[in-house]
Amino acid sequence: MRYFAKRVGQAIVTIFAATSLTFVLYRLMPGGPVEALRQEYMSGERDFASGGAGRDPEEIDRLIEFHTGITPDQPIHIAYYEYMRDVLLYQDFGMSYYYGEPVFDILFRAMPWSIFVSVYGLLLGFAITIVLGAVMAFKEGGRFDKVMTVAIIILDSIPYYVAAVLMLATLAFGLGWFPTGGRAYPDAIPGFNLYFMQGVLHHGTLPILSGMVVGFGSGALAMRANSIRVMGSDYLRVAELRGLKDSRISIRYIGRNAVLPLYTGFMIGLSSIFSSSVIMERIFTYPGVGWYTFDALIRNDYPLLMGAFIFFTVITVFCILIADLTYGFIDPRASTENKESY
């Protein structure tokens, strides 16, 4: 119990520290949101209603506060206290000045779509990794093993966004098999109806396939190497001498021990794939959290950008925490309090 409490405490401290550091850098770095907006107003580049060059400084401060929620002359420690209070107590991340909606509502509405394509992509890639790596290990030195090793090395050297662009160009724009953007059919009524679900699957196929590329490649080679190492262990020969079935030896003795090193990598990959969704969702015009994050960066929508960063931080720490807490169930040797899972 102390082990779980310690890990949860460390996760909370990590989220708190990352959020605090980002807040400070966000406010104090040169060219931060306040300074950038001030320069835009003073130069007349940003002209919402009746502005332009030569605005009154107090009026500029009021506009900055209105559009960013930041009071320019407020001490940073008070601003930090108010921001964290609003986030923790009221889930208030501020207002997106471009969309005119609360940041929390935008991210909460986009989150299921990002989770759908990211998690399914990684799960599909991880499953193929396990099966392919195990087959390559059993056929070690054979033609299949040699061909797949070369093919995986080539595939692993190709960035996922290149694969995404190729898929979009050939399967969507070229052959027309998949839509070129969106999350569902425009005329579908959202809900548990067949037409809407078909549209969701149809629009999500290419993003899922591109996410699969992230979890593929080196993982299969790692699974192959782990399986070969485990197959040479003495306890396998003991199991064979005991007359155990081949299926039991393959699954419980080889598969379980070979997949252990990949488990933590899978959970960390689950967190990193959300960050990669920033590019992936932009390529496929798929409005998820990554789409809004990139959009906020382009439009200098600082409240939305800060909220998206907190979202990615929480997801990353949460995935690592889950990997840490569940590793002991998979490998009992790591369940003691004085041992690190990874």
Image (cartoon, grey):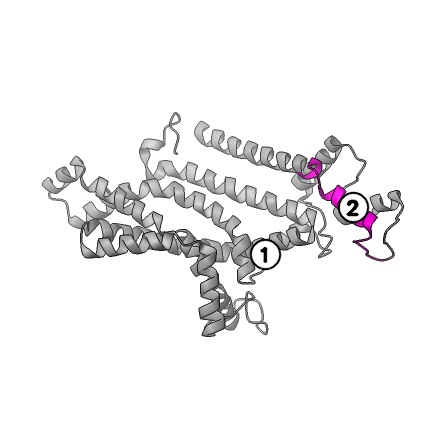
Towards the viewer: 303 or 8: 303
Q: Magenta stretch: give its range.
A: 26-49
Residue 118 horizontal/vertical position (percent): 48, 54
Front tag of 1 and 2: 2
- Three-letter amino acid code at the position of disc 1: Trp
Q: Residue at x 76, y 45 (%)?
A: 69
**What residue is shown with label 2?**
39
Q: Earlier in the sequence, mark 1 or mark 2?
A: 2
Relative to residue 149, is residue 3 drawn left or right? right
- Quadrant in which the N terminus appears: top left
| Crowding at mark 2 (Cα within 10 Å: few <14, some 14-19, many 20+) | some
Check if residue 146 falls in the magenta segment.
no
Q: Residue at x 15, y 48 (%)?
A: 245
**What residue is shown with label 1?**
291
Q: Which mark is residue 324?
A: none
- Quadrant in which the C terminus appears: top left
**Cβ atoms under marks 1 and 2 closer than 8 Å:** no
Relative to residue 307, is residue 78 drawn left or right? right
Towards the viewer: 190 or 323: 323
Q: Secondary structure at mark 2?
A: helix
Q: Secondary structure at mark 1?
A: helix
Residue 131 horizontal/vertical position (percent): 29, 53
Q: Residue at x 25, y 56 (%)?
A: 147
- Three-letter amino acid code at the position of disc 2: Gln
Q: Is residue 211 above or below residue 316?
A: below
Measure the C-alpha gap from mark 1 to mark 2: 27 Å
Q: Using the rendered view, name the quadrant where residue 158 is placed.
A: bottom left
